[in-house]
């Protein structure tokens, strides 16, 4: 389709509706999180072409989930891909804005799953991100990597780290900070849909000042995130009477599944089902 030159749409980013519907009509097995409680909340697991936003305070396992999904997608890729695709190792794009990615943790989880940790590490393309301008540039360059490699999983940990810090920076205009953040969200959504990726975003939080609310924290920049994405999961924790740390995953918004809240545990084996 030829567009008029003054039409403000990039033709390269157009997706044919019949192509999109064909992708949606192909029955795909959801990618397991490795924990039945998470799979239950997710409607069976992570689905391609979807963006998932996980928010919550520290010690709820957000970064743990990112590491665990690198393992899960590697296992899935080994089971389902042809020999030719298996030889092309890179299947995960991991954008680390908080400097929390740990190769040692990947090695530990790989060992627990009887996987060679070097093969798993070679499957993860990690980018250390130092600003939102850097993140936008990295995401803009991601498409060529996705086209040339069988990328299945896109992770940003966390999506709003630099938006949070840069909006208070007097050397940066708020307009620039906001527009860069919006362009990042738009590009992520386009990449996810156009290339049928599973996208996992973690988000930093701010207090919810409405009293007696079940959701005690909200993602920073929620009004922008909510404009682009629909699947939001609140991770929280509290101590029980025996001083045990109880973690909850709460599906607070979804176009696919009903609201639900379940227990889980964060252990040395990763995120696992809560044992009563």
Image (spheres, grey):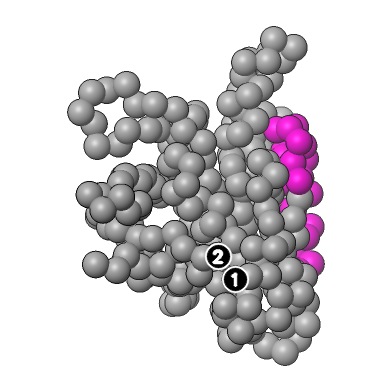
Q: Is residue 33 above or below residue 233?
A: below
Considering depth in this image, is 25 or 31 the residue closer to the camera? 31
Reply yes or no: does residue 123 show up in magenta: no
**Is 36 left, or right, of 240 in this rendering?**
right
Q: CA distance from mark 2 to mark 1?
A: 7 Å
Q: Residue at x 46, y 75 (%)?
A: 28
Query: Which span of residues is magenta-colored?
Result: 128-150
Is residue 3 visible in the rendered structure shown here? no
Is residue 100 toward the left or the right of residue 220 in the image? right
* Residue 112, image x, y percentages: 57, 78
SS for callout 1: helix
State if disc 1 and disc 2 touch (CB < 8 Å): yes
Q: Residues within 10 Å of mark 1 (few under 14, many from 20)?
A: many
Q: Position of residue 212 (x, y in %)?
A: 20, 28
What residue is pinned by disc 1? 109
Which residue position holds label 2? Answer: 68
State the image coordinates of residue 77 (x, y, percent, origin top left): 62, 79
Q: Nearer the viewer, mark 2 or mark 1?
A: 1
Instruction: Give x and y (percent) for residue 31.
Output: 48, 71
Query: Which residue is at the front of the view, 14 or 52?
Result: 52
What residue is shown at x 45% (from left), y 71% (from top)?
Answer: 34
Query: Which residue occupies 35% across, 60% down?
Result: 264
Secondary structure under badge 2?
A: helix
Q: Relative to residue 160, is residue 165 depicted above or below?
A: above
Magenta region's main secondary structure? helix
What residue is shown at x 22% (from left), y 49% (from top)? 241
- Which quadrant of the figure contains the C terminus? bottom left
Q: Is residue 237 above or below residue 74?
A: above
């Amino acid at each position: 389709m030829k567009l008029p030159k003054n039409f403000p749409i990039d033709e390269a980013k157009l997706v044919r509706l019949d192509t999109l519907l064909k992708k949606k009509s192909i029955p795909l097995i959801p990618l397991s999180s490795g924990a039945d409680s998470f799979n239950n909340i997710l409607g069976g697991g992570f689905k391609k072409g979807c963006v998932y936003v996980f928010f919550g305070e520290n010690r709820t396992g957000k970064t743990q989930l990112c590491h665990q999904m690198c393992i899960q997608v590697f296992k899935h890729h080994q089971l389902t891909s042809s020999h030719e695709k298996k030889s092309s190792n890179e299947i995960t794009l991991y954008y680390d804005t908080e400097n929390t990615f740990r190769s040692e943790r990947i090695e530990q989880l790989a060992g627990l799953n009887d996987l060679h940790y070097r093969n798993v590490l070679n499957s993860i393309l990690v980018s250390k991100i130092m600003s939102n301008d850097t993140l936008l540039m990295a995401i803009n360059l991601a498409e060529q990597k996705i086209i040339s490699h069988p990328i299945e999983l896109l992770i940003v940990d966390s999506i709003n780290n630099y938006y949070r810090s840069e909006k208070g920076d007097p050397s940066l205009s708020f307009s620039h900070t906001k527009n860069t953040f919006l362009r990042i969200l738009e590009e992520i959504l386009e990449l996810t849909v156009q290339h049928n990726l599973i996208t996992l975003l973690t988000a930093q939080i701010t207090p919810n000042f409405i009293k007696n609310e079940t959701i005690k924290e909200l993602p920073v920049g929620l009004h922008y995130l909510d404009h682009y994405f629909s699947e939001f999961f609140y991770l929280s924790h509290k101590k029980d009477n025996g001083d045990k740390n109880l973690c909850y995953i709460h599906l607070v918004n979804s176009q696919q599944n009903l609201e639900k809240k379940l227990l889980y545990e964060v252990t040395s084996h990763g995120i696992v089902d809560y044992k009563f």
